[in-house]
Image (tube, rainbow, N blue to C red):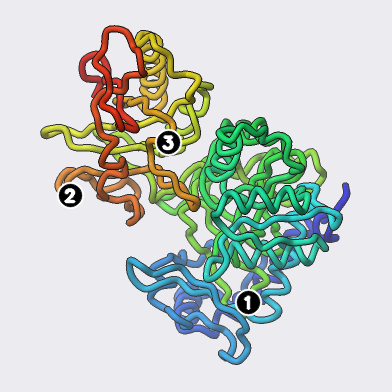
Amino acid sequence: MDYYDIAETWSRDEIEAVQAQRLRDTVRRAAGTPLYARRLAEAGLTPETIRSPEDIRRLPFTSKDDLRANYPQGLACVPRSEFVRMHCSSGTTGSPVAICYTKKDLDAWAALMARSMYATGIRREDVFQNMSGYGLFTGGLGIHYGAERLGCLTIPAGAGNTRRQIKLIRDFQVTALHILPSYALHVAAQLREEGEDPRSLPLRIALVGAEPYTEETRRRIEDMLDLKVYNSFGMSEMNGPGVGIECEAQSGLHIWEDAYLLEIVDPQTGASLPDGEVGELVMTTLTREGMPLLRYRTRDLTRILPGPCACGRRHRRIDRILGRSDDMFILRGVNIYPMQIEQVLMSFPEVGENYLIRLEDEGELERLRVLVEIRESSFVEDMRVLRQLQESIARRLRDEILVSPRVDLVQKGSLPRGEGKAQRVQDARSATMVPEVARGATMAPEVARSAALVPEGARSAALVPEGARGAAMAPEGTRSAAIPPEGDTA
């Protein structure tokens, strides 16, 4: 095994021995904060009573509400003069979540990120373009310093400005990058629209993360850009990127267990779940000096993959993030995750890169509506072909989520397209009709009960390709529309 850090070669016994010692050190540091001092005392847990990593289960969970309640530095374990950087969330819906870092914390973070990049095959000879946003967001600087630590020529391109991104890739012969999955599809699509082949770029590796995506989306990105896509995992509460990464085997995300203690628990009961069973990821920092966190509930849904990885590393692997316990929505008593819908949509070659899930009122009932952009080559004059595609998608979705959706096929470019994280869900139901989300979670504020994203000129009822037989022509200037199903599928 080719490795960056000797910790990658450790056996399970070595990893767990280091975890136990570092957990004792972490508990000792955390006891210096009012929150953890109280909780440790209530649990009767001291550094001396910790014999194995499993002893952490005697503690209650830490939640995002705890972090907000202790904003800005209520969880600090060192004097303010010891901190050298702070990252935080935007805080647009309440108190933000702030994490402060000592110099030692930043050094450890950069080393973990460099280790992660090395595991994917990136080397100091690569030119790395960082397309993550810089600023308070952890992605930009976290990835940047990891790339520099590895020795790569690092381009801090930031987010957006697609033409500039493509120019930098070409001018500096960029071979590796970090990019959002939805933006990777957007870049490839824009090149095709301009008559260029996305596969002609010099890229060979893409680290992809920051928003959920399916295996089908990964394969589509790899095919469109002719590179290898590696799933990257991180979160601000655990430092940022560098918590976990796929190795070259692409068979799950290795969590660096010398730095983090991971658990999978039932989102409803909090009970520990065995390897292979999907639940909520819970993380404990093991090396953070300034603001350690014990048993932090990430709300990310995944599972521990049983067995060793072919690469030889014994750091356990988790599956890709399958969704979040707080982005699940309930429709007619059925729990649905947006990732289930994406997985079905991306299995159809006719489907483009953008889609929108809308939850709507329909009288006293609720309806699931899925607006799907399809490729220009898939729009044909024969409406029967489009109808068959629409019905096939609806049928596959119904089989997957157990709810009959209305599927609207819309023209490419009809749905809103940003250069940041893709907004995939719109909950347009009235407040009285939105049920409590299962397992105590709620819809994320930015997607809950918001107005329609479809542009004002894009809400016609029927999409009719020019020259379509036996159908009314779409009004000139209409950018999108839908082919309504035969009857009501809702």
**Residue to which mark 3 is pinned:** 413
Q: Can the viewer see residue 216? A: yes
Where is residue 463 drawn, in percent x and y? 31, 23
Q: Is mark 2 on a helix, strand or loop?
A: helix
Q: How crowded is mark 1: few (under 14 residues within 10 Å), some or many (20 or more)?
A: some
Q: Do the residues labelled 1 and 2 touch (CB within 8 Å)?
A: no
Q: Residue 431 carries which label?
A: 2
> Distance between the Cα atoms at labels 1 and 2?
48 Å
Q: Residue 47 carries which label?
A: 1
Residue 9's tag is none
Residue 11 visible in the shown view: no
Extreme left residue here? Answer: 363
Quadrant of the snapshot with the C terminus: top left
Residue 455 image position (x, y, % from top left): 30, 42
Instruction: Name the amino acid, label 2.
Output: Ala
Mark closest to the chain's N terminus, 1 or 2: 1
Mark nearer the viewer, 2 or 3 = 3
